[in-house]
Image: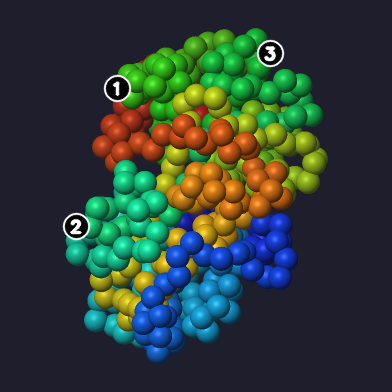
Amino acid sequence: MTMRRIWVGRVLSISAAAGLTGGGIGPASAAPPDALVAAAKQEGQLTTIALPHDWCGYGALIAAFQTKYGIHVNELNPDAGSGDEIEAIKANKGNKGPQAPDVIDVGLSFGPSAKKEGLLQPYKVSTWNSIPAASKDAEGYWYGDYYGVLAFEVNADMIDKPPADWGDLLKPEYRNAVSLAGDPRSANQAIQAVYAAGLSQSKGDASKADQTGLKFFADLNKSGNFVPVIGKAASLAQGTTPIIVRWDYNALADRDTLKGNPKVQVIVPKTGVVAGVYVQAISAYAPHPNAAKLWMEFLYSDEGQLGWLAGYCHPMRYNELVAQKKVPQALLAKLPPASAYGNAVFPTLDQQNATKDAVTKGWDQVVGANVK
């Protein structure tokens, strides 16, 4: 698709969303080197691409970075897709002007492929060790920034007792209630939902998750509980799809947008908690390499991580921040319990590719539900 991200419009003030005053979030966990700050200020500009202000709190993050360092942020095509970001680097290899992006924020699969093409330069931020090893390139060419987990978005006006885990969705009380937020024959979010259900049913055995997940949805369909309609905020509110399996940040945004009409509950399942990750990287041809590095330092500081969390996107250092009691209570209160994310599974690229192949090829034969 051409739009990089589908998001319900809402721009958050970082300090307000985090429950803080004075326009700040608190001290960063590690200050960037003075020499880097000076070099970045001398460059005077940072060029970003594909960062909608209402996605993951980016509007407030960009404003905070500009205020903190006095560096102008030149924003290219906020609605670009990950592929467009990569193409922008390729198209501007010899261009030091305003159309050349310094940094990118892309889907997980684009990090390794861009590295392989020589489009990225390595940089390890001061908080590098706190980024999970499975979600970063060992040499520093790309690194996970934030993630969402697949959750149940529930119309609480229609569903008296919401499901707590995947197995609950098979109960008779959820007849004609459960939907996916995409077609599992083509949409990654829906494909990963099948994997998550399978991981739960196979008690964490990833080798069986694809087939177990397909069987689970086949049973869900046979029981009459599965609704072959792509779930959205509108269908949730109308009651067509009172339970939608989707990324938690989209579900939480829907909760805000619907404003209690209907009341929305967002529940992270007890098992089969699968995370989807985006990654940051610096262009190998960045016109402002020092500003790019300073931007990364900012994003991976406590301040930047909490900024993403204010936009409902879980930063990669989330567990660490919670353990150190650095997440304001007002912000935690707007999220599912922190403990719900403790067992999140981050599928590797190989696992994602294998799941995509198994689900897209097997859905019609095993499940037989025409989702549209």
Q: CA distance from mark 2 to mark 1?
A: 28 Å
* Colouring rule applied to residues: rainbow
Instruction: Report the residue marked by disc 2.
Output: 116
Mark 2–mark 1 contact, CB under 8 Å?
A: no
* x and y percentages locating residue 94 in the rendered image: 24, 81
Q: CA distance from mark 1 to mark 3?
A: 31 Å
The label shown at residue 207 is: 1
Q: What kind of residue is marked 3?
A: Glu
Q: Residues within 10 Å of mark 3 (few under 14, many from 20)?
A: some
Residue 159 figure quarter: top right
Instruction: Report the residue marked by disc 3.
Output: 173
Q: Residue sitting at 65 percent across and 46 percent down? A: 332
Question: Is residue 368 visible to us here?
Answer: no
Label 1: which secondary element: helix
Mark nearer the viewer, 1 or 3: 1
Left or right of 335? Residue 32 is left
Q: Residue sitting at 36 percent across and 27 percent down? A: 359
Label 3: which secondary element: helix
Choose the circle earlier in sequence order: 2 or 1: 2
Left or right of 166? Residue 367 is left
Q: Nearer the viewer, residue 196 or 127?
A: 127
Q: Residues within 10 Å of mark 1 (few under 14, many from 20)?
A: few
Choose the circle earlier in sequence order: 2 or 3: 2
Q: What kind of residue is marked 1?
A: Ser
Q: CA distance from mark 2 to mark 3?
A: 50 Å
Q: Is residue 127 above or below residue 360?
A: below
